[in-house]
Structures are given as structure tokens and as C-alpha cells.
Image (cartoon, rainbow, N blue to C red):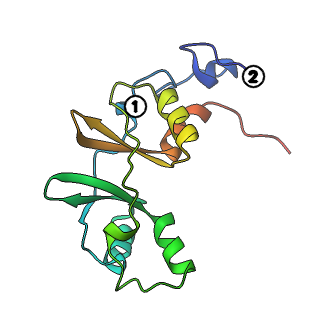
Amino acid sequence: MTLVEGEGTAALAGIPRTGPTPTDPVRLVMARRLLGVASERSLRDVARELYESEVGVVLVDNPGGATGLLSERDLVQVVADGEDLDERQAADVMTADLVTAEPDDSIAKVGALMRDAGVRHVPIAVAGTVVGVVSIRDVLAVLLAGLEPAQG
């Protein structure tokens, strides 16, 4: 199946689309509610914050601004390795080499960025300041909107 520029997957399936399309700006689907934690916070505290806030990723902050992302998957790796969640800090396991996008980048472009970088969350930044975050789930929801579920 080939995407026709500007039409999105729903149009290809013959179903009217409501909501954002893959060519729309990512700002339409990004989460603006960002949870930040200090870089010295214990991983147990970070896990508690993720659970209580019902989010899958946090920004790790330093006084100069966001320095990294820490996700549920990062915490699972620490647990699987048998490490102490009370001893390890957010800065120890965060992803510091951030892959970012801009609010006006298309949803499809951000999805391709995720695929190419092998990440599930992309911070959305304006002039170096993180203003939102988009997850692979947000992108997939747009790409799959309007497709009929498989029969069987």
C-alpha cells in the first residue's frame, strides 16, 4: 500500500477520516503535560512518579534544562539486571542523546524519525526548550485511524 501525500490511511481505505492525518503537524498529537524529575532522583522514586502520573516517560532535568529522557523500558532493564532502584539515579540510566523534533514537523516525519533512531518517545522542542513529547502510540493512532480491523 502506498500513501498518497496529504490523504492519510483512512482515505486509502475508503473511510472518511476525522482527526489528524500523517501530514499534519505533530503538535496536534503531542502531550503537553510533561513530567520532569531531577537527575539525582532514585529510580524507585521515578518509577513511583511514572505509575502515579500514568505516563511512560519523564524528562530528566538539571538546572540548565532537560538533559535526558527516562522511560519505563529503562527501568525494566535495571530491574532485569538486578540493580538496586534505591541506589541508582535518574541520570545513571536516562537517554542523554535526545532525538528531538519541532512542533510543525509532520506526524509521519516524526514516525520515521522514531523508526530510524529506534526510539519510542520524541521530545518536541522549540529553540532548545522541550514543549511536549510524542510517543509511538500517538503516531500509530494517526497512521491507523480509519482502517477497518482485520476480519477473522
Rendered position, 127 above or below 36: above
Left or right: where does residue 39 sit relative to residue 107? left
Rendered position, 95 above or below 135: below
Q: Quadrant of residue 25?
A: top left
Q: Residues within 10 Å of mark 1 (few under 14, many from 20)?
A: many
Type of amino acid under label 2: Met
What residue is drawn where x is 34% and y is 32%?
Answer: 27
| Quadrant containing the C terminus in the rendered view | top right
Q: Secondary structure at mark 1?
A: helix
Residue 34 seen in render: yes
Residue 49 seen in render: no
Q: Residues within 10 Å of mark 2 (few under 14, many from 20)?
A: few
What residue is drawn where x is 15% and y is 53%?
Answer: 64
Rendered position, 152 above or below 108: below
Q: Quadrant of residue 30?
A: top left
Rendered position, 104 above or below 151: above
Residue 97, given in percent of the width and then of the height, sits at 39, 49
Left or right: where does residue 117 sit relative to residue 104? right
Q: Are marks 1 and 2 in contact (CB under 8 Å)?
A: no
Return the residue at label 2.
Answer: 1
What residue is drawn where x is 51% and y is 48%?
Answer: 119
- The count of marks equals 2
Return the residue at label 1.
Answer: 26
Type of amino acid under label 1: Val
Left or right: where does residue 77 sit relative to residue 38? right
Residue 18, given in percent of the width and then of the height, sits at 50, 26
Residue 74, given in percent of the width and then of the height, sits at 47, 66
What residue is drawn where x is 51% and y is 49%?
Answer: 120
The residue at the far right in this view is 152
